């Protein structure tokens, strides 16, 4: 099975953050940017679009200091901040046990009063992969004028993924699903669960064939 990897709020609210250095409005992928991403424009694909991923990210402008808003709270291994994954070292070590094609940037975090909250990392998969088995997928395909198209699934529609195309990949971004975030295999999902990595949604699963 495969599923989308999405953060889940802890408690009643999802709190925000602000970068204390860098320039969050001007993050970009590192050159050369995959051609599949160029076609959509920088406002459609990018490190800060639905958690990013699918290509290496340039380190220029990436914040190294992050301040959480709101009250102090229990921090988790897997979260979303600034439209990117923000994770612990424990999360990184676990994912790297499955694949090395990932990238992360350290951020020293603090609370609103300036006291330290620990080190976390902005995290991306660098794998861009189309592993959808089209003849076994019921999701809606929307053609684009520029050629190609997008998967825009409606309620009750589903995907099927080709295990042979996935190979040793366990976390990837599909170039035809730029607004859905990264996908993970069931093997990686089970490892995250067994290690008590918190906190991600139990998203709808799709077949791996």
Image: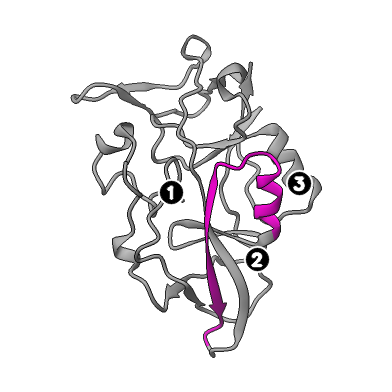
Q: Please, which colouring scheme is shown?
A: one colour
The x, y position of residue 95, in whole percent, is 66, 46
* Residue placed under numbered mark 3 in the picture: 193
Residue 11 — which label? 2
* Label 1: element kind: loop
Residue at 56 percent of width and 82 percent of height? 111
Does the residue at mark 3 contact the one at mark 1 (Cβ under 8 Å)?
Answer: no
Residue at 47 percent of width and 29 percent of height? 129
Q: Residues within 10 Å of mark 3 (few under 14, many from 20)?
A: few
Number of marks in picture: 3
Region rendered in magenta? 90-112
Up/down of 76 relative to 3, above or below: below
The x, y position of residue 191, in whole percent, is 75, 42
- Tell me the distance, in whole angstroms, between the alpha carbons under discs 3 and 1: 23 Å
Describe residue 73's horizontal placement relative to residue 140 as left or right.
right
* Label 3: element kind: helix
Residue 52 — which label? 1
Q: Quadrant of residue 5?
A: top right
Residue at 61 percent of width and 40 percent of height? 203
């Amino acid at each position: 099975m495969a599923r989308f990897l999405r953060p889940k709020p802890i408690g009643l609210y999802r709190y925000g953050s602000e970068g204390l250095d860098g320039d969050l409005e001007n993050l970009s992928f590192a050159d050369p940017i995959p051609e599949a991403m160029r076609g959509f424009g920088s406002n459609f694909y990018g490190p800060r679009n639905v958690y990013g991923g699918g290509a290496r990210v340039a380190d220029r402008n990436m914040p190294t200091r992050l301040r959480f808003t709101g009250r102090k709270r229990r921090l988790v291994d897997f979260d979303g901040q600034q439209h990117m994954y923000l994770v612990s070292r424990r999360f990184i070590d676990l994912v790297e046990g499955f694949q090395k094609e990932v990238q992360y940037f350290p951020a020293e975090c603090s609370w609103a009063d300036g006291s330290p909250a620990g080190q976390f990392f902005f995290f991306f998969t660098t794998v861009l992969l189309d592993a959808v088995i089209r003849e076994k997928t019921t999701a809606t395909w929307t053609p684009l004028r520029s050629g190609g198209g997008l998967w825009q699934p409606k309620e009750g529609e589903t995907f099927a993924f080709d295990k042979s195309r996935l190979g040793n990949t366990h976390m990837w971004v599909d170039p035809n699903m730029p607004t859905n975030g990264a996908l993970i295999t069931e093997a990686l999902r089970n490892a995250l669960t067994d290690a008590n990595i918190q906190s991600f949604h139990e998203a709808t699963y799709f077949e791996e064939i």
